[in-house]
Image: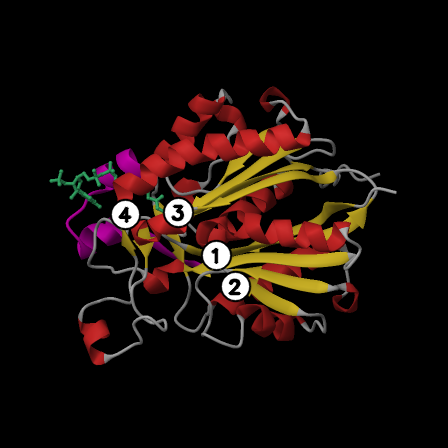
């Protein structure tokens, strides 16, 4: 009998605070017009001072478990995709496991903005191999904690949030195929220099602002618009799905211009490319499950829909998954 991993629950959490383009105009030499034209972003959710990544993850995890109707004792594995952990250790997965009252194994996956797709591969493998029946997968990040709000080239892009899915063993449907990639030689295109073992925190690293994101925006842009179509096509081919059969293309939300370019390159109409980047900005590993939750709760997903989820980010990393949605639209349950 074939074992597949289907998504039986989805949930998300965005902190209440917002940084608008008008706020950024007061911080750096920029304008609403420049930001909207170049990125499509209008506002970014920002975690409260007292909220760490695990606080957002717990809220998203609770919501996904409630939608799935799964009790804490029935979760076999918790996988946390994040590159902004609460601390070096314990893992954010373990902190979230405690917060959710789970007793299963828990760990972190760091593939930056591709983290959700990488972790989906791990979760799917655990279920398909029979090592787990029910997996809680959370993507959560607080990138604004690592953003230099004096650097206009990066501070306009990022927000905080969390999204989660519950995966369960099924006989059909669910995750059909996953393609992943990495190119570590180009890691310096997008990185945080200090705070790790290579450059431990010191008064000097703080003075040099080396705990913040450094990015070559042009190169990351070019990388994204090349790799997203390639990896999406690889996942579609693996799944035996034609691009024309997709109900939704759900890309990592980084920049509206990236979304528009990949829609054209893949030949997917703009109405079928999900976008909420205007109001969430780039929430890293949270962006794809946040998108799924948005589509599900607004009744835009129906059982049988074929979805392509695609991410890219620091590493450099990239990846795509083709998923057959099996959950009934809210309000249309029998
Ligand atoms: N406001 C006003 N002017 C600005 C701003 C700003 N916020 N930022 C840059 N500029 C200026 C630059 O200084 C430059 O000025 P110059 O011509 O006088 O030198 C000019 O605008 C053009 O700059 P570019 O960098 O060429 O602008 P571009 O159109 O490439 O847009 C951007 C920059 C938005 C960063 C774009 O390159 C991008 O989105 N790249 C992808 C970034 C991304 O997605 N990163 C996340 C990856 S996922 C992860 O793992 C975290």
Query: Tags 4 and 1 in contact by the CB under 8 Å rule?
Result: no
Query: Tags 1 and 2 in contact by the CB under 8 Å rule?
Result: yes
Q: Nearer the viewer, mark 4 or mark 2?
A: 2
* Segment tinted magenta in the rendering: 15-39
Between discs 1 and 3, the one toward the N terminus: 1
Residue 281, numbered circle:
3
Q: Residue at x 63, y 43 (%)?
A: 297
Is 37 situated left or right of 82 in this image? Answer: left
Q: Residues within 10 Å of mark 2 (few under 14, many from 20)?
A: many
Between discs 4 and 2, the one toward the N terminus: 4
**Which quadrant of the rendered structure holds the C terminus?**
top right
Query: Residue under circle 4?
Result: 21
* Residue 158 seen in the figure: yes
Q: Is residue 330 magenta?
A: no
Q: Nearer the viewer, mark 4 or mark 1?
A: 1
In this view, the residue in front, 232 or 103, is 232
Above or below for 6 versus 27: above
Residue projecting furthest to the left: 29
Is 278 situated left or right of 330 in this image? Answer: left
Indicate the secondary structure of the residue bearing disc 1.
strand
Query: Residue under circle 2?
Result: 56
Q: Is residue 37 magenta?
A: yes
């Amino acid at each position: 009998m074939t074992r597949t991993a289907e998504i039986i629950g989805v949930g998300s959490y965005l902190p209440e605070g917002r940084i608008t383009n008008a706020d950024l105009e007061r911080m750096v030499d920029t304008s609403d017009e420049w930001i909207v034209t170049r990125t499509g972003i209008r506002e970014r959710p920002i975690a409260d001072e007292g909220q760490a990544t695990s606080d957002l993850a717990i809220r998203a995890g609770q919501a996904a478990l409630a939608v799935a109707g799964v009790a804490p004792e029935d979760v076999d594995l918790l996988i946390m995709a994040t590159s902004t952990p609460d601390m070096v250790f314990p893992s954010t997965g373990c902190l979230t496991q405690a917060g959710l009252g789970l007793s299963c194994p828990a760990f972190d996956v760091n593939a930056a903005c591709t983290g959700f797709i990488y972790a989906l591969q791990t979760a799917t493998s655990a279920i398909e191999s029979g090592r787990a029946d029910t997996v809680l997968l959370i993507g959560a990040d607080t990138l604004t904690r690592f953003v230099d709000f004096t650097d206009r080239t990066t501070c306009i892009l990022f927000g905080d949030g969390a999204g989660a899915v519950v995966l369960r063993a099924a006989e059909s449907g669910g995750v059909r195929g996953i393609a992943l990639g990495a190119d570590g030689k180009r890691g310096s295109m997008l990185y945080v220099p200090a705070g790790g073992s290579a450059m431990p925190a010191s008064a000097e690293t703080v003075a040099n602002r080396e705990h913040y994101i450094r990015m070559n925006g042009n190169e990351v842009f070019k990388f994204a618009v090349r790799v997203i179509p390639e990896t999406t096509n690889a996942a579609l081919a693996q799944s035996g799905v034609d691009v024309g059969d997709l109900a939704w293309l759900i890309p990592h939300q980084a920049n509206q211009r990236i979304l528009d370019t990949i829609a054209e390159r893949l030949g997917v109409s703009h109405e079928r490319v999900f976008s909420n980047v205007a109001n969430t900005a780039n929430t890293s590993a949270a962006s794809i499950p946040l998108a799924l939750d948005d589509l599900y709760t607004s009744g835009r997903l129906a059982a049988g829909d074929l979805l392509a989820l695609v991410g890219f980010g620091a590493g450099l990393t990239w990846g795509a998954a083709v998923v057959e949605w099996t959950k009934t639209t809210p309000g249309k349950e029998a």
